[in-house]
Image (cartoon, rainbow, N blue to C red):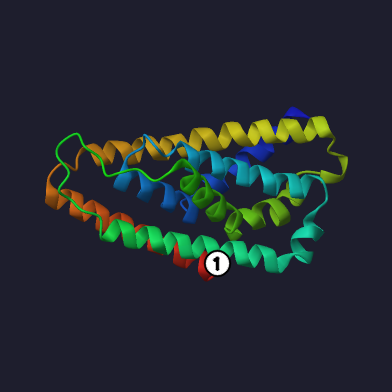
Amino acid sequence: MEPTSLLIFAGALLVAAGSPGPSIAALVARVISKGFRDVLPFLVAMWIGEAIWLSLAVFGLAFVAQSFHLAFVVVKWLGVAYLVYLAWKMWTAPVEAREGEMPRQDSAVRLFAAGMAVTLGNPKIMMFYLALLPTIIDLASVTVVGWLELTLTMAAVLVAIDLCWVFAAAHARKLLRSQQAMRIANRVSATTMAGAAAAIAVR
């Protein structure tokens, strides 16, 4: 692909993905509540989910998303339900951990499933790839190599953005040491996670 086209795509994705949305809210809430050490499966699932939407758009499979609309609605509401569950777990999380200890981590499979559900069920991401992307890239002329270039560009942008959010949230978490601060952090994270669920549900 032309470098100009890749730059336009990267710029549009930077604006779309960099603006806080349900996925970023869920990621930040997770890091503040549980720490960043076990968040990688969640991140990887988010990146794979976006690659799936990109592939659907590039290979002209937008009609699949329309034909199987019910399936995507189901994924969306499963994501909403899981975010609500996480919000409840954060709200009721114990705060008796000693200094240096973190609450017990969730399994990698559960975190991966949560990240995938949040990404595939996020209408903001869906609309970017299936509605906005065709207006900035001539998808009809994209080859397999072009798809790979777009995917690598997408990965570079998303990794940079998401890691910035993770590091910012992890830094904020370091300031939360007392039980009262941990309780406040858990409640704020739970509220943020619930807000992310609501944002997905109403779209």
Q: Residue at x 31, y 54 (%)?
A: 189
Q: Amino acid at mark 1?
A: Trp
Measured from the top left, where is residue 118 in percent x and y? 53, 55
Q: Residue at x 58, y 63 (%)?
A: 76
Measured from the top left, where is residue 18 in percent x and y? 50, 44
Residue at the extreme right of the image, as rendered: 141
Residue at the extreme bottom of the image, as rendered: 202
Q: Is residue 119 left or right of residue 6?
A: left
Q: What quarter of the picture does the C terminus occupy?
A: bottom right
Q: Is residue 126 left or right of residue 81?
A: right
Measured from the top left, where is residue 172 in percent x and y? 27, 41
Looking at the image, residue 117 lies above or below residue 169: below
Q: For this rendering, which residue is in front, 181 or 86?
A: 86
Measured from the top left, where is residue 201 in percent x and y? 52, 69
Q: Is residue 96 left or right of residue 12?
A: left
Give the structural element (helix, strand or loop) at label 1.
helix
Looking at the image, residue 157 lies above or below residue 125: above
Q: What quarter of the picture does the N terminus occupy?
A: top right
Q: Is residue 1 visible?
A: no
Q: Residue at x 57, y 58 (%)?
A: 122
The total number of labels drawn is 1
Neighbours of disc 1 within 10 Å: few (<14), some (14-19), many (20+) = some
Q: For this rendering, which residue is in front, 70 or 32?
A: 70
Q: Residue at x 82, y 34 (%)?
A: 144
Q: Which residue is mark 1?
A: 77
Q: Is residue 203 visible?
A: yes
Looking at the image, residue 75 lies above or below residue 19: below
- Quarter location, residue 93: bottom left
- Quarter location, residue 34: top left
